[in-house]
Image (cartoon, grey):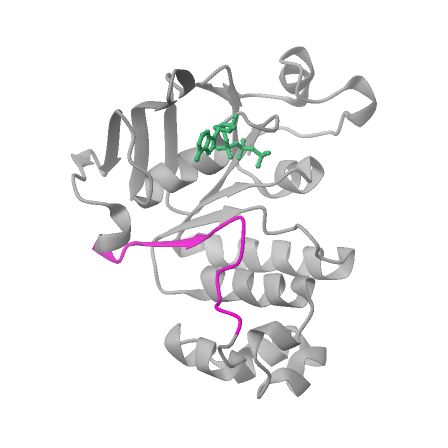
Amino acid sequence: MVLEVDNIELNYGTKKVLSGIYLHSKLGTVTGIMGRNGSGKTSLLNIIFGSLSSKYKSIRIDGKNIKKPLFSTNKIAYLPQHRLLTKKIKLKTAFKLFNIEWDEFIGYFESFKIYKEYRAHQISSGELRLIETYLILKSHHDVILLDEPFSFIAPVYVERIKALIHEQKSNKIILITDHSYEHILDISDNIYLLKNGCSKLIGNTKELINEGYLTVNSLQKWSPR
Ligand SMILES: Nc1ncnc2c1ncn2[C@@H]1O[C@H](COP(=O)(O)OP(=O)(O)OP(=O)(O)O)[C@@H](O)[C@H]1O
C-alpha cells in the first residue's frame, strides 16, 4: 500500500500556507514531517485526514484518487495536536470504543493499572497523551497520523512509544510530526521538511541545517533507511 499526498494548496485569507506538497509513504514505513512553527504541519495532517478543506488536493492510495475525506473510509486514525478524548470519558470505556485491550496496554505501561476506572480528566496531561497515542497507534487502521505525540511525555515513556511505533509500522503507514527532532530522526524511514509552503524530501541532516531547520549544534547522525 502506498499513500501519496500531492498538489495541496491551502490559503488562510490572503496568506498562502501550503502550495507545493508531495508526500510519498508506503506500508511498513514511518514518514517524519518537520518544519518550523507555522510551516503548516498540522494543517497538512488535517487536510490528509479530511477535517480541513483546501483549495486543491490530491490524495491517492495505490495510485487511486480518494475523493471523499479519508476519515470516512475507515482507513485512517489521527492523534490531533490537542486532546483526543473527552474529559469525562472513563479510560476503560475509551479502550472499549477503540476495541483495544486494556490488559495488553498494562503489559506495556504497568504503572497505569490503577487508572482503569478513572476518567480522562483525572490523570495528568502527559499520562492522557500517552494513552491517546497508544490508542491511535494500536487502532486497526492502515494510515496513522501522529501530531506531536511526544509533547509532555517523560523520556522513559517516549522510548516505549518509539518502540511501539517500530512494532506497529510493519502493517501500517505512519506519518508523524513533532518538535523533538532527534526522536523523529531516530524513528523515521523518510523525512520531509515543510518550508515556504513546499515539502522537500530530506536525504541527510546536513540538508536540515542548510534549510535552516536545525543548527550545527543540534546535528544528529541520521541517514534514511
Ligand atoms: N484557523 C486559522 N486561521 C488563520 N490562520 C491559520 C489558522 N490555522 C492555522 N493558521 C496559520 O497557518 C499556518 C500554519 O499553521 P499550522 O498549525 O499548520 O503550523 P504548524 O507547522 O503545525 O505549527 P507548529 O509547529 O507551531 O504547531 C500558521 O502560520 C497559522 O497562523
Quadrant, the N terminus? top left
Asked whether 77 falls inside the magenta stretch, the response is yes
Q: Is residue 197 left or right of residue 131?
A: left
How far across and down, in percent of the image, does residue 121 sit? 60, 73
Quadrant, the C terminus? top right
Q: Is residue 10 above or below residue 31?
A: above
How far across and down, in percent of the image, does residue 191 sit? 53, 30
In this view, the residue farthest toward the right is 217
Q: Is residue 201 left or right of residue 187?
A: left
| Most foreground residue, 223 or 71 | 71
Q: Is residue 63 above or below residue 98?
A: above
Count every numbered label the image shows and give the total. Answer: 0
Asked whether 44 falls inside the magenta stretch, the response is no
Q: Kindly identify the residue that appears in the image at 38 percent across and 76 percent down.
A: 97
Quadrant in which residue 98 is drawn: bottom left
How far across and down, in percent of the image, does residue 45 sit? 42, 39
Q: Is residue 150 left or right of residue 77?
A: right
Start-end of magenta stretch: 73-87
Q: Kindly identify the residue that appears in the image at 56 percent across and 21 percent down.
A: 203
Chief SS of the magenta region: loop
